[in-house]
Image (cartoon, coloured by chain):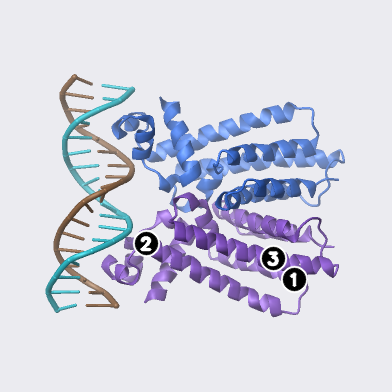
Chain colours: A blue, B purple, C cyan, D brown
DNA sequence: GTCTATAGGTGGATAGAC
DNA sequence: GTCTATCCACCTATAGAC
């Protein structure tokens, strides 16, 4: 049951934000009462934190096959952007991108887990970028970490605006260009 | 009084989002009652719409001096990014970037004005980009409009993540790199 | 684990006195 | 224009029966 609750809550946050849904919404979707939900997640703040922890774990797990794949750095970046595209294709925003907008209103534990998500993403990207530049597949100046933070920011921003413009192709165009600009 | 209400509401949306504040917050900040606010803005949806309209007008007005300035395209882009940086330096997110995240929960009239804001921005940027490429100050492939939407998306995303990482320098680094990549 | 019932608070919004 | 007073819907959260 916990997972089913998290599934619905995740969807709600990705489309409406943490301040844009209530226990009543989850209850209605699952056909149970609000009280039942409080048995599994006493406070909304806890539910929110668990949501980020699970999302982060799933996201990092999705990076594993990319790491172990045969492709070079450009291909790894394309597959990374593909994860975002898949989320967007379901008319959802990245959970953490959504929460980043609401950052100031979130409970401290959620803020901490949110920073962790982005740090892990940037760390992974920085590794791919550094290795790619070393073997001559990518070309860029400055610290890989700076480019990594640019990529995360830009992909999150592109998702957000693509959603409000109702077209996912817009995201693809931007993602492709970001990666093409890094080609050696 | 209308402007004072809009000032406070604007600040609240930029920091907490449209679903993250109430009339009570504005009332407390201005030292008046909620009922007074409803005299000027009967519905929150109307207040929200007026907020976007005013913000858009102010934003476009800020582009005028850039248009009339002596600088070339790279300088114009730097000054454009400077507008975002100024907002961020006050620990605020772009009003419309914030609302883009909450897009699905916004009343229709707000959604429409929001799209207009971004369209105007991309249109202006596309003009600068096209002209800059024509005279050899900038170099990029494909339609100027595609690069324009990349810039808007990336700058909005960078603002959002810089805010949740509590450092504005992060934004500057990203903005500088985005513009440098367009140099001829 | 899930329910009914309810507490205690806050949301946007209105009526009517001043 | 601003106030007091109030409405009703909704919020998160809890108590206690089943």
| A138 w.r.t. A34: above or below | below
Q: Would you say residue A142 is visible in this rendering?
A: yes
Q: Which chain's residue wears label 3?
A: B
- For the C terminus of chain A, give its image quadrant: top right
Rounded to the nearest angstrom, the CA distance separating label 2 from label 3 is: 32 Å
| C12 w.r.t. B104: above or below | below
> Residue at label 3?
B125
Between disc 3 and disc 1, whose residue precedes? 1
Rounded to the nearest angstrom, the CA distance separating label 3 from label 1 is: 12 Å
- For the N terminus of chain A, give its image quadrant: top left
Determine crowd level at label 1: few under 14, some 14-19, many 20+ residues with C-alpha closer than 10 A: some
Q: Which chain's residue wears label 2?
A: B
Rounded to the nearest angstrom, the CA distance separating label 2 from label 1 is: 39 Å
For this rendering, which residue is in front, B30 or B167? B30
Q: Secondary structure at mark 3?
A: helix
How far across and how far down the image is residue A137, in percent?
Answer: 85, 40
> Residue at label 1?
B75
> Residue at label 2?
B44
Determine crowd level at label 3: few under 14, some 14-19, many 20+ residues with C-alpha closer than 10 A: many
How far across and how far down the image is residue C18, in percent?
Answer: 14, 79
Would residue B126 appear left or right of A84 to someone viewing this image? right
Identify the residue at horizontal 78%, vertical 52% (top origin).
A142
Q: Secondary structure at mark 2?
A: helix
Identify the residue at horizontal 79%, vertical 50% (top origin).
A181
């Amino acid at each position: 049951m916990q997972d089913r609750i998290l599934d619905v809550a995740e969807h709600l946050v990705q489309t409406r934000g943490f301040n844009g849904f209530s226990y009543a919404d989850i209850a209605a979707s699952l056909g149970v009462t609000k009280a039942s939900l409080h048995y599994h997640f006493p406070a909304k703040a806890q539910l929110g934190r668990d949501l980020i922890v699970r999302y982060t774990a799933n996201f990092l797990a999705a990076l594993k096959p990319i790491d172990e794949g045969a492709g070079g750095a450009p291909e790894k970046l394309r597959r990374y952007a593909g994860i975002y595209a898949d989320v967007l294709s379901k008319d959802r925003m990245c959970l953490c991108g959504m929460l980043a907008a609401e950052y100031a209103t979130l409970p401290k534990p959620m803020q901490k887990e949110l920073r962790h998500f982005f740090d892990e993403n940037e760390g992974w990207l920085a590794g791919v970028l550094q290795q790619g530049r070393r073997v001559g597949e990518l070309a860029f100046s400055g610290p890989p970490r700076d480019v990594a933070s640019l990529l995360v920011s830009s992909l999150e921003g592109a998702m957000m605006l693509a959603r409000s413009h109702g077209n996912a192709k817009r995201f693809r165009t931007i993602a492709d260009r970001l990666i093409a600009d890094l080609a050696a």
